[in-house]
């Protein structure tokens, strides 16, 4: 007998659960590096626990632990989005194998009637994380201990409980193996250089890497998407020519509002700009988990919400970096001091100009944050069937007053407007780059929601090959 929906809802609560499908859920959360630090109810919430563990294993702590000292990973947001998409595909497939209501991402066997969801989801996440990141090194010990501690906390007092645990581990292994097989040789861990991507010679309008640090995202243009047919499937049109009056309008806007010592940017706008300089994968994962808990989503629905959001975000990043390294457009901190070379009489050079934040080391167009955040928003919009969803996101970015560390949105699309505006205010992007990034993210989000993670009864308009 499969788990009933009421049972699945109970698994998402913070209180211990006894007797669900003939078994007892974990009553006490095991001590782990990540989940308690993130304030989640751990073992009573299998998907939330392992989603958070995945975030910790992928997202870095950042300088001085700014992104969270519990984090163990080393992926900047572009790559982290892809890794999170892959892990959540395995978590989703393990959850779906219990109920069979939705189409799996990769072929996964149906779970026996007596199967522990906790063991299945934990194993799927752990196997996928360690399969994706065999180079975790000493941090692998932390993840190993978290997994073993989680399994040890599962009940084994009866023969039925022991069988349920074994069945869950088997299903988790199968889900992870199937997803990892699909992602074999997908372009992760490449040795691509800027020269391999065709770095143009220095010229007005052409981004050049900051020599003080490594250029980021070089693998992403050649990475196989999780859902799209190709990285360039929805590539946007080229940015405005330097002589275009619309380029001059964008130029002068960011020149005024995005400079570190702007006289016109308000204190609230400065907080808005800094809010979005946190690691956005951490922000979005925690935000989606809080949303799932607030909406009391069941086990499968929580896994489906997360996988739709993370796969949309992953492919938006891949598509975005395909465009970035196709157009090679320069950043404001390069464009403004060199405006006397752009051929546009409406732009004036300022050799002293500096952005509010430290600009990421990759090309400007389109905005990666806009691509990613809008794709996630579009996936959530499709999941709930409405934009009228209250969402709270948090930021650990330095320089923010405590009162500005939470932002609550009554409608999902307001997040998009916030991000688009913030990337100008922080001095990273021209406005058109944000708008085009959001357009790309919106298209990717719709594509993923339309083509993947649908009910079993759904029939696609056209066959979409699994990636």
Image (cartoon, rainbow, N blue to C red):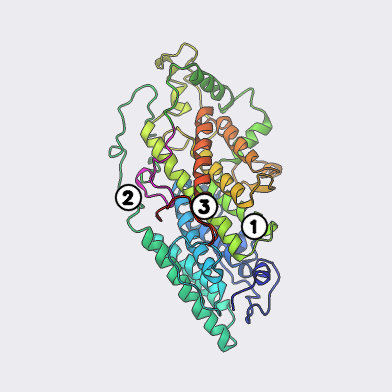
Judging by the rendered image, the residue that carries numbered circle 1 is: 292
Percent x, y of residue 20 = 65, 77
Element on which disc 2 rests: loop
Magenta stretch: includes residue 232: yes
Residue at the spot 48% in from the left edge and 54% down from the top edge: 85
Using a 10 Å C-alpha cutoff, classify the residue at mark 3 as few (fewer than 14 neighbours), some (14 to 19) or many (20 or more): many
Judging by the rendered image, the residue that carries numbered circle 3 is: 310
Magenta-colored segment: predominant secondary structure? loop
Marks 2 and 1: CB-CB under 8 Å?
Answer: no
Percent x, y of residue 195 = 28, 37
- Among the two numbered marks 1 and 3 on one chain, the one whose residue lies closer to the N terminus: 1
Q: Could you say which quadrant of the image residue 106 lies in?
A: bottom left
Between 8 and 453, the residue placed more toward the observer is: 453
Element on which disc 3 rests: helix
Residue 207 is at least partly visible in this image: yes
Q: In the figure, is residue 229 to the left or right of 64?
A: left
Estimate the spatial distance between the alpha carbons at disc 2 and disc 3, rounded to whole Å. Answer: 22 Å
Estimate the spatial distance between the alpha carbons at disc 1 and disc 3, rounded to whole Å. Answer: 14 Å
Residue at the spot 37% in from the left edge and 50% down from the top edge: 224
Element on which disc 1 rests: helix
The label number, if any, that marks residue 190 in the structure image: 2
Q: Which portion, as a residue range, is magenta?
A: 220-236
Residue most toward the left?
Answer: 196
Marks 1 and 3: CB-CB under 8 Å?
Answer: no
Percent x, y of residue 158 = 59, 88
Using a 10 Å C-alpha cutoff, classify the residue at mark 2 as few (fewer than 14 neighbours), some (14 to 19) or many (20 or more): few
Establish if 262 lies above or below 456.
Answer: above
Residue 60 is at least partly visible in this image: no
Q: Which of marks 2 and 1 is in front?
A: 1
């Amino acid at each position: 007998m499969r788990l009933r929906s009421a049972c699945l809802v109970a698994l998402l609560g913070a209180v211990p659960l006894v007797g669900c499908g003939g078994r007892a859920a974990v009553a006490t959360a095991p001590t782990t590096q990540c989940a308690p630090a993130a304030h989640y109810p751990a073992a009573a919430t299998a998907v939330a626990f392992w989603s958070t563990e995945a975030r910790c294993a992928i997202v870095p702590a950042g300088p001085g632990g700014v992104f969270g000292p519990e984090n163990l990973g080393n992926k900047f947001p572009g790559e982290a989005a892809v890794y999170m998409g892959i892990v959540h595909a395995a978590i989703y497939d393990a959850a779906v194998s219990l109920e069979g209501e939705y189409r799996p991402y990769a072929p996964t066997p149906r779970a026996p009637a007596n199967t522990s969801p906790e063991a299945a989801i934990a194993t799927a996440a752990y196997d996928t994380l360690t399969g994706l990141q065999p180079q975790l090194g000493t941090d692998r010990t932390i993840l190993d201990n978290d997994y073993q501690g989680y399994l040890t906390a599962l009940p084994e007092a009866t023969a039925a409980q022991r069988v349920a645990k074994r069945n869950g581990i088997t299903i988790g292994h199968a889900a992870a193996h199937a997803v990892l097989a699909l992602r074999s040789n997908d372009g992760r861990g490449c040795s691509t250089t800027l020269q391999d991507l065709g770095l143009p010679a220095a010229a007005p309008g052409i981004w050049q890497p900051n020599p003080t640090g490594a250029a980021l995202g070089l693998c992403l243009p050649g990475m196989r998407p999780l859902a799209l047919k190709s990285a360039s499937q929805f590539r946007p049109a080229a940015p405005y020519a330097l002589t275009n009056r619309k380029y001059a309008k964008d130029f002068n806007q960011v020149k005024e509002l995005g400079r570190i010592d702007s006289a016109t940017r308000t204190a609230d706008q400065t907080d808005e700009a800094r809010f979005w300089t946190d690691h956005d994968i951490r922000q979005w994962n925690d935000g989606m988990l809080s949303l799932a808990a607030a909406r009391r989503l069941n086990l499968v629905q929580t896994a489906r919400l997360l996988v739709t959001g993370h796969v949309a975000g992953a492919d938006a990043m891949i598509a975005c970096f395909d465009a970035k390294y196709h157009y090679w457009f320069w950043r404001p901190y390069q464009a403004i001091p060199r405006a006397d070379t752009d051929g546009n009489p409406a732009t004036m050079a300022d050799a002293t100009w500096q952005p509010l934040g430290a600009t990421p080391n990759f090309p400007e167009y389109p905005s990666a944050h806009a691509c990613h955040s809008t794709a996630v928003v579009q996936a959530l919009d499709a999941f709930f069937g409405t934009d009228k969803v209250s969402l709270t996101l948090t930021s650990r970015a330095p320089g923010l007053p405590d009162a500005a560390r939470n932002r609550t949105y009554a409608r999902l699309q307001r997040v998009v407007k916030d991000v688009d505006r913030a990337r100008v205010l922080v001095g990273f992007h021209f406005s058109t780059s944000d708008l085009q990034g959001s357009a790309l993210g919106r298209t990717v989000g719709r594509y993923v929601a339309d083509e993947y993670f649908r009910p079993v009864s759904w029939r696609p308009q056209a066959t979409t090959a699994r990636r």
